[in-house]
Image (cartoon, helix red, strand yellow):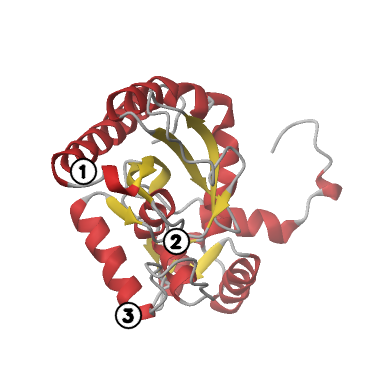
Amino acid sequence: MQADLDPRSIVGSIIKASKLLEIYSADRREISLGEFTREVGYNKTTTYRLLQTMVSAGWLVRSSSGGYRLGMRLLFLGAIARQDLDLRNEAMPYLQKLAEEVGDTAFLMVPGDAGAVTIEAIFGPNPVRVYGVMVGSVLPYYAAAGPVVLAANIPELEEKVLNGPRTRFTTGTTVSKATLRAKFAEVRELGYALSMEDYIDDVAAVGAPILDAQGVAIASLSVGGPANRYTGEMRRRAIELVVESARALSAHLKSLAGWGF
């Protein structure tokens, strides 16, 4: 406890809850009630009530096996804590290179409560541009390449999307829960998402996740343009460049002191 803090002003239950969170580590992402009770030393009733409170607050989520995992709210708070690093500035060279080499608009997106938030967009030399997505745009996680790779690589977010409402934006929008679940699995396996007119008519995009050391997405890189360009060799090349750029940026961020990967 810091010396300048008055012990009478400390809320004991919050301190107890923080002790539970401190058990998590990079190689220990799910913990059972019994493990919490044994390792922290609280009685089972107290531990259970603390865990249930944290689930209600969005700090933790209950898995299908009965254990507890860190929740989306903590992920969002962690993203805010990393703002000093300035993800946008670190990603800028990768975005500029991607936009130049593919020729279309490159996007950087991060997870938000209501959808994927576009925090940067760099135009390529192609005079035909995508104006339906710009800095500040919030896109649904089940359409467009950048949002889809975020949902596919954030387990808690994927379940939230699968169990939430979905709107059909175009004839290509995936709204079926079973089809969307299969789509997320395929995106994880391939390492990228391909969007063909599923959010905006006549617009295609390719996106890949920026992953932390545990394989969880913290952001996505994507590039999008006229759908008629994303065929054959052009499509193959765009996929290759996006995947390479996302992997390189992920490695770069992990190498920076203080990123916390």
Neighbours of disc 1 within 10 Å: few (<14), some (14-19), many (20+): some
Q: Amino acid at mark 3?
A: Ala
* Residue 62 seen by the camera: no
- Residue where numbered disc 3 is placed: 178
Instruction: Specify which label sits upstream in the sequence, 1 or 3.
Output: 3
Helix, strand or loop under label 3: helix
Q: Residue at x 19, y 38 (%)?
A: 234
Q: Quarter of the image for the N terminus: give it.
A: top right
Q: Residue at x 56, y 67 (%)?
A: 42
* Residue 203 seen by the camera: yes
Q: Residue at x 62, y 41 (%)?
A: 136
Q: Quarter of the image for the C terminus: give it.
A: top left
Q: Is residue 175 left or right of residue 100?
A: right
Quadrant of residue 211 within the rendered picture? top left
Residue 155 x %, y %: 39, 62
Q: Is residue 240 left or right of residue 77?
A: left
Residue 10 x %, y %: 79, 50
